[in-house]
Amino acid sequence: MSDAGKGILAMIAACLVWGLSGIYYKALSHVPPEQVLSHRALWSFLFFAGVLLFQGRIGVLGTALSSRRNAMFLVLATAMISLNWFVFISSVQTGHATEASLGYYIFPLLSVLLGRLVFSERLTRTQGAAVGLAALAVAVLSFGLGAAPLIPLVLGGSFALYGVAKKQLSLGPVVSVTAEVLLILPVALAVIWLTGGAGFLGSTADAAMLAFSGILTGLPLILFSYAAKRVRLGTIGVLQYLNPTLQFLVAVLVFAEPFTPWHSAAFALIWSAVAVFSFSALRQERASRRAAMAATGVSAQIR
């Protein structure tokens, strides 16, 4: 199998873990979300620190935190990913997994918008249309539910801002994520200590599931990193929608959450936006690939 084929399989595997993780956290509904989050941070840190130790790169962690610029953006990244994790876990546990899946559909479109606002990246007409459809979906759902869909907006917005922070970091994915969970670790340990084990002492099954959340968090990130080096970005952009699609199916088919006509209208608009956005991304990638091939040909002729 080619490297690209292996990368695609790794990306699909990562999305499967992310998309089905709601089932895992639903099984921990009897454990308060702040306690689940605390254990997720603790065991994720141990997992990633173990990976760095195995690679002989644990010293890089101190170097990463010694830079004031890195530290500033790591704090922002830590705040955003902690908020994202907490809201996702809470949403699943309280019967709002459908809204959570909508947030992860919105996230790439918000990322494009932030790219325009923060980094002055050019927004094509097609991308602008996709963002417009997503905004219309949020407006429709707000009108139908009589309130702004805070869960999708917080999840999509926090993950998009997390991406902005990560873009400013000159660190590898494992090092940066290890630094992020290290920064939240004192708070996580305080929660665990003050709550007498934070669910860890409830039963052997709970303890095992909370500890395994570290692997559940770390493994898909490593698979994603593996895929990102071997698969074209446009392909990754399309494949990543497998994650919210699985979340949506789990919410409706497994958790039997209500799916109103207003949800139907909003999701129809979001799926249209996803189709438009994916088409634009793939077309841009083909254009850049053709330009690169043409440049290579010209360079060869000059030689």
Image (cartoon, rainbow, N blue to C red):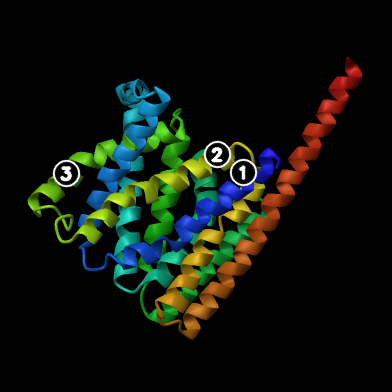
Residue 195 x %, y % = 10, 54
**Helix or strand or loop: what does disc 2 sit on?**
helix
Residue 149 x %, y % = 39, 70
Q: Which of these two is toward me, 261 or 33?
A: 33
Instruction: Tell me the quarter of the image containing the C terminus.
Output: top right
Residue at the image position 24 percent from the left and 60 percent from the top: 205
First in residue order: circle 3 vs circle 1? 1
| Quarter of the rendering containing residue 67 | top left
First in residue order: circle 3 vs circle 2? 3
Residue at the image position 44 percent from the left and 45 percent from the top: 219
Which amino acid type is marked by label 2? Tyr
Residue 63 x %, y % = 34, 20
Marker disc for residue 226 = 2
Q: Which residue is mark 1?
A: 7
| Side of 262 relative to 52 (left or right) | right
Asked if one can make out residue 91 in the rendered structure from this viewpoint, the answer is no
**Helix or strand or loop: what does disc 3 sit on?**
helix
Q: Which of these two is toward me, 213 or 75?
A: 213
**Helix or strand or loop: what does disc 1 sit on?**
helix
Asked if one can make out residue 250 in the rendered structure from this viewpoint, the answer is yes
| Side of 277 relative to 195 (left or right) | right
Residue 291 x %, y % = 79, 36
Closer to us: mark 3 or mark 1?
1
Residue at the image position 63 percent from the left and 44 percent from the top: 6
- Asked if the residue under mark 1 is in contact with the one under mark 3, i.e. CB atoms within 8 Å, the reply is no
- Asked if the residue under mark 2 is in contact with the one under mark 3, i.e. CB atoms within 8 Å, the reply is no
Q: Which residue is mark 3?
A: 189
First in residue order: circle 2 vs circle 1? 1
